[in-house]
Image (tube, rainbow, N blue to C red):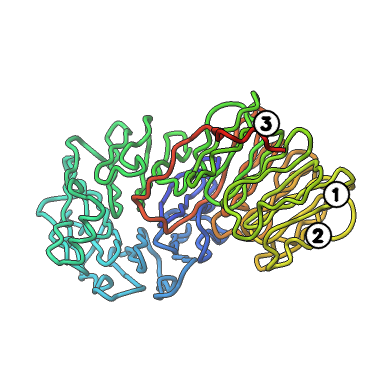
Amino acid sequence: MNAPDGLFTAISAGSGFSCGIRDSGSATCWGANDSGQLNAPDGLFTAISAGSRHVCAIEAGGAVYCWGANDSGQLNAPDGLFTAISAGSRHVCAIEAGGAVYCWGANGAGQLNAPGGLFTAISAGEWHSCGIRDDGVVVCWGANDSGQLDAPGGIYTDISTASYHSCAIASGGAVDCWGATAPTAPAQMLLKRLGLDDLLDAPLGEFTNISAASGHSCALGTRGTVTCWGDTTWGVADPPSGEFTAISAASGYSCALGTRGTVTCWGQNDRGQLDTPDGAYTAVESGELHSCAIKASGTVTCWGHIYGGLERAPNADFSALAAGRWFYCGLRPGGAVVCWGDNSSGQLDAPDGTYTAIAAGGSHSCGLRPGGAVVCWGDNSSGQLDAPDGTYTAIAAGGSHSCGLRPGGAVVCWGDNSSGQLDAPDGTYTAIAAGGSHSCGLRPGGAVVCWGDNSSGQLDAPDGTYTAIAAGDTFSCAISPDQAINCWDWTTSLPQRIKWADQVNVTRSPGDANLP
């Protein structure tokens, strides 16, 4: 997950999204937005916490504001002034100015039933909550099916709760973790599947800040270095080097706040869409779970989820490449189109003739004739083949829609419009790209503008100047003037232990010398 540029004073990682407080005091969120969790309100904030699909923050005056999912009442914050807050999976706990704890939201395991007394720190997990009393003792409440309430004795300064375990920093700086014992069958099966045998094996050393996630935990050392342990999938236990001031761990990834206020995130990158290879490129195309680019040398490199022969281009030279959902089309130097991969909707059956440009969508393809006419083939369930008459200079094919660029720079789109992917902003463009349910355009000055579905952040193009763009199913990519590739998105709900293909070089299959 790529954090936005700028300086921050606080960060919090949720389930597939993150939030931070900028040095100006405003709140900013990025990543998945399926429940409006990125729609931070205006105002100045002093603390912020991201839950599963909701966010709560304390504004400068002490009031609590929450946004995002409200399926369990987790946005129904009580009135009053608060000093600390923590958002769990579907509940929230906060410390009132006088030191009392208030919790709201889901209460299926008693995670809202905070004991009386005064507290200095609070943390809300999935089905349990923990707090540090004013005397330094840890108290936990809620579900205890994995021993997550069995806090050790002692004096503690910081605490963090996850799904089945909790961790706290003792007064001397050591880390203690408990839970994840899985005495019940369902919890035991889950922990075995995640491979969390060493989840409680906190490292030795002195630490100042702790953050626990469902499969791993991270701690901030006294010298600013980050140490993580537990599940090593996606490299989530391998934090970058450097000095940091705060950390936040979430399921599959973590984020840290640098000493200069910059945010760094590492770990799960879902389908590899952001793992762009090094090097210089002249064109890029993105499919549903994969991308391909033409290097400056003319060779093709692909990355992401590559399988089923998608990487095996025919034995021929191509001047352009288009990536569909599970197929590719290539433009030969003489203008012929050759496609390979899935043909369940006839998306490989390009009409004879010459073309100057090609585009591949979900299950359809389009080509631009030398005179400027658009021809499309394949699936037409949403009218994505019905290009308006007239001449075009560029084309793009999305999931179930298509777009064309008129000679004057206007964008025209046709097909499915369920997410507003046909509603291009007014103005002139020099290039276009169509994704699963969104579209992007390149302005004459090099700025990127996107429209349509933004459930995975695919419209949140970074600032800057670009020379080429591409849109995938739920992500987008662009090439900057220095020929580097930048991609943006966040996609959730992927099984944690799927192995995605590494970067591969396209190879040609033997016996294809007779292609047109």
Mark identifier at residue 23:
none
Does residue 180 sit above or below 269 in this rendering? Answer: below
Residue 99 is drawn in which quadrant? bottom left
Distance between the Cα atoms at labels 3 and 1?
26 Å
Mark identifier at residue 392:
1
Whether label 2 touches label 3, CB < 8 Å: no
Looking at the rendered structure, the number of numbered marks drawn on it comes to 3
Distance between the Cα atoms at labels 2 and 1?
10 Å
The amino acid at mark 2 is Ala
Whether label 2 touches label 1, CB < 8 Å: yes
Mark identifier at residue 387:
2
Distance between the Cα atoms at labels 2 and 3?
29 Å
The quadrant of the rendering that contains the C terminus is: top right
The residue closer to the viewer here, 263 or 333, is 333
**142 with respect to 472 (left or right):** left
The residue closer to the viewer here, 243 or 501, is 501
The amino acid at mark 3 is Asp
Residue 78 is drawn in which quadrant? bottom left
The numbered mark, 3 or 1, whose residue comes first in the sequence reads 3
Whether label 3 touches label 1, CB < 8 Å: no
Please report the residue visible at 44 percent of the width from the left and 37 percent of the height from the top.
502
Place of residue 88 in the rendered image (x, y in percent of width and height, measured from the top left): 34, 63
The residue closer to the viewer here, 108 or 287, is 287
Residue 243 is drawn in which quadrant? top left
Disc 3 designates what residue? 317
**235 with respect to 202 (left or right):** right
Place of residue 390 in the rendered image (x, y in percent of width and height, measured from the top left): 90, 55
**138 with respect to 509 (left or right):** left
In terms of secondary structure, where does tag 3 sit?
Answer: loop
Counting other residues with Cα less than 10 Å from the Cα at mark 3, is it few (<14), some (14-19), or many (20 or more)?
some
In terms of secondary structure, where does tag 2 sit?
Answer: loop
